[in-house]
Amino acid sequence: MEDLTQALVQENQEVHVLTIGQAGEEQLHSRRQKGVFVHRVEAYPIHTPDFLTWVLQLNIRFLEEAMRLFSTAGPFHLIHAHDWLVAFAGRALKHAYRIPLVATIHATEAGRNRGIHNDLQRYIHSVEWWLTYEAWKVIVCSQHMREEVQGLFQVPPDKITVIPNGVVVSKFSSVQVDPGLRQRYALPYEKIIFFVGRLVVEKGVQVLLEAMPKVLEACPEAKLVVAGQGPMEGELKGRAWELGIAHKVAFTGYIDDRTRNQLYRVADVAVFPSLYEPFGIVALEAMASGVPVVVSETGGLKEIVTHQVNGLRAFPGNPNSLADNIIAILRDKALASALRKAASRLVKEVYDWRQIARRTLELYHSVYEEYRRTPWSERSSVIHRFRRYASALVGYNEGKASFKETPEGDLMGGRYDLVGYRAALVNQKRGREGLI
């Protein structure tokens, strides 16, 4: 999101980002970063019994900060919510200020877990559906995600727009490698196989470990570098020992962006064996860095990588297929060079953030123009809204018609409001005597 917002600023847009900060962070609340107004809020300093409670409290903090921004930096023309974690704040702001909401779904709970298996997942799944329902338009990053979102949430096809993620090529292509960095992870003669990502089941690192004995049999000089953290870290290290390859696998733990970019530059091949991958921006980063890639033929990865053109694709969850493709790149320098060149052209011509920002901006303009042509964009006065609400409670239409005689669509001054209608219905049954 950082690169997208900065690219939108370059298109002469004013962008405000509301995100979470950490206690003690310098300039926690608001500052301008490369033209983007970034507003960081800290979650309430109280204990929460579970993750979902923390999410709800964070959304309230976002609302508090957003209300301040609407009064000091507004008006705003559109709200863009990214994923279910901010669905509550996004929906509340949409209805409170009567401006359109656009939502980006980066991944789904069902996709991450290969289905919905418990109440927590079911809850998150329902919030994801709710966000797509409330949004004017839904953005996804790949055709794979379009099909997934449409199938899971029954979103109308014309409500979904595919806009891929991108990469700032210069961040990766111009990296200077520190002397001695490579020696921290591999011997001078070893060829580096590089993976970076979260150590979770869906990223498929376990498949990569299972492929390594075959890779080492063909290329004894290979060395696997696994960068990242996650709940599977201990299990993966244990499996490396069981396979007898622990001396050929380096688990780096967390690394910063600068180290990651340097490792891309010194790697001989980057491997991303995901079982579930909505897009696969790590593949673009590797391509921009000039390292050939091997990916699993799944999700957004198969839309980025064309087999034997700009990378190689392996069957998902298949260690033998993955090993064969890694070996092909390590053994064939001509193939590796050809893949690198084609990948470099691809990221420059298709996945440049400026182009992606323009497509996003076109969607914003389209949504706002549609919004302006609807009655919902009309902002009635406070007095008018109070009169409509009071009329609904009393059960009269303009103070004359009885509740039973009032069409449902007229309860709120010509606009149907489900919550208001139900409140009026309940109060009407209790009698009108005590309502005024």
Image: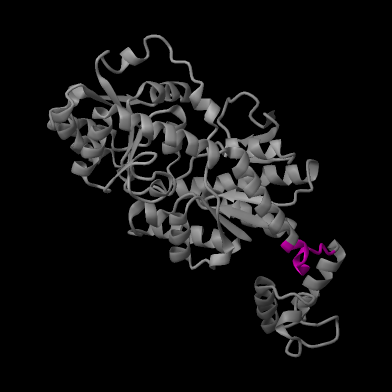
Vertical comparison of 220 with 95: above or below: above
Q: Position of residue 108 (x, y in %)?
A: 44, 54
- Residue shown at 18% from the left, 42% from the top: 320
- Residue shown at 84% from the left, 71% from the top: 387
Nearest to the observer: residue 269 or residue 338: 338
Asked if residue 379 lies left or right of residue 423, the reply is right
Reply yes or no: does residue 165 show up in magenta: no
Q: Position of residue 415 (x, y in %)?
A: 75, 74
Work out which residue is located at the far top of the displayed protein and give it.
Answer: 179
Vertical comparison of 304 with 334: above or below: below
Asked if residue 28 lies left or right of residue 166, the reply is right
Nearest to the observer: residue 331 or residue 162: 331
Reply yes or no: does residue 375 show up in magenta: yes
- Residue shown at 59% from the left, 48% from the top: 59
Span of residues in magenta? 370-380
Nearest to the observer: residue 70 or residue 433: 70
Vertical comparison of 306 with 222: above or below: below
